[in-house]
Amino acid sequence: MLYQLSYRPLRAPHGGPDAALRRTIVPPSMGGVTQTAETTPETGQLTLRDVVAVLERMHPLDTAQSWDRVGLVAGDLDQPVSRIHLAVDPTLAVIEEARAAGADLIITHHPLLLRGIHSVATTTAKGVAVTELLVNDIALYCAHTNADVADPGVGQALADACGLTRTEALEITEGQELGRVGDLPAPTTLAEFARRLHENLPRTAGGIRVAGPADGAVRRVAVLGGAGDSSFDAVRAADADVYVTADLRHHPALEAREEASLTGGTPYLIDAGHFASESLWLPGLASRLMAELAGAAARLEVHVSQVRTDPWEFVLGASGPEQDPLSGPHTNDAGDLA
Ligand SMILES: [Zn+2]
């Protein structure tokens, strides 16, 4: 898909609560003139500063992992905010969706600029994203690993979708509680558990993948939204029957299943999809933002993006728990055992 850059004019300098007193003076050497910020701020107009303060109370910056890059990515703290757009990823489609909806602020889980970049020219997708945000006057805020560990946060949202009511931390990483583990109200089978979880997840082309017998007993559940194949030791230590996470790569997943085969077969694995497992956080965040901010705002709308930022479009050869596409001996074209 081609993204057509679509600019609307930048508005006048933003006025904050002290806008009447603020003056931006551009030195004559820069060919400048004296600009006066808006002098009549609307009563009850939320600013980006207000929203950021609430976000950082919910997800303190110092609870993010040391490698992460969270917080305000683009925007002017004094700019008015009346329409907020929530998404997992700040993709070009999400930014276009937000622009078309007239959003002032996009809040995403994943950072746009996690690694060092040296250009925001429109010769790269990230450059287009930054340019689109700036020229359309849309702020971007990211709450990533600090949202993972928050309560309510990404981990608890996934635990809720699994039907866990009381949970504890799966592991402690850099002093923060990462992932959740808890017991289902009643035992069930792996297939039934997976079915119920699937019903609570947004639809994606890949669905969810399950490793373990359909009739395996499940009571204790560990969850970690997003990529979780580095936490198998914590899952085993928690004595979980099933581990719900995403981005399970071949070798770590296979080795975890091999280890499980020596200890009764658990933990079973469910790869719920990176986007799907983390998108569960967004509706709750929308409600919390409305509860925190709506009272102080003359007008506020919070929307959850309808863009599925899962990158996969379709799959072939998938099967449900009732079918086993690999059953029977594998044969080559000549009919011999392969
Ligand atoms: Zn993630």
Image (cartoon, helix red, strand yellow):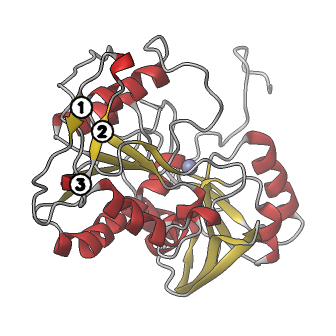
In this rendering, does residue 157 appear at all?
Answer: no
Quadrant of the image containing the N terminus: top left
Residue at the disc numbered 3 = 21
Label 2–label 1 contact, CB within 8 A: yes
- Mark carried by residue 34: 1
Task: Residue 100: give x, y in percent of width and height.
Answer: 17, 34
Alpha-carbon span between mark 1 and mark 3: 14 Å
Q: In the rendered image of this protein, does residue 78 appear above or below residue 127?
A: below
Q: In the rendered view, does 277 fall on the left or right side of 299?
A: right
- Sort mark 1 into few (<14), some (14-19) or many (20+) by Cα contacts within 10 Å: few
Q: In the rendered view, does 226 fall on the left or right side of 108?
A: right
- Mark carried by residue 24: 2
Alpha-carbon span between mark 2 and mark 1: 7 Å
Q: In the rendered view, does 154 fall on the left or right side of 263?
A: left
Residue 32 appears in which quarter of the rendering? top left
Residue type of the residue flagged with mark 3: Leu
Report whether the residue tagged 2 is closer than 8 Å to ligand 1: no
Counting residues from the N terminus, which is met first, the one under dot 1 or under dot 3? 3
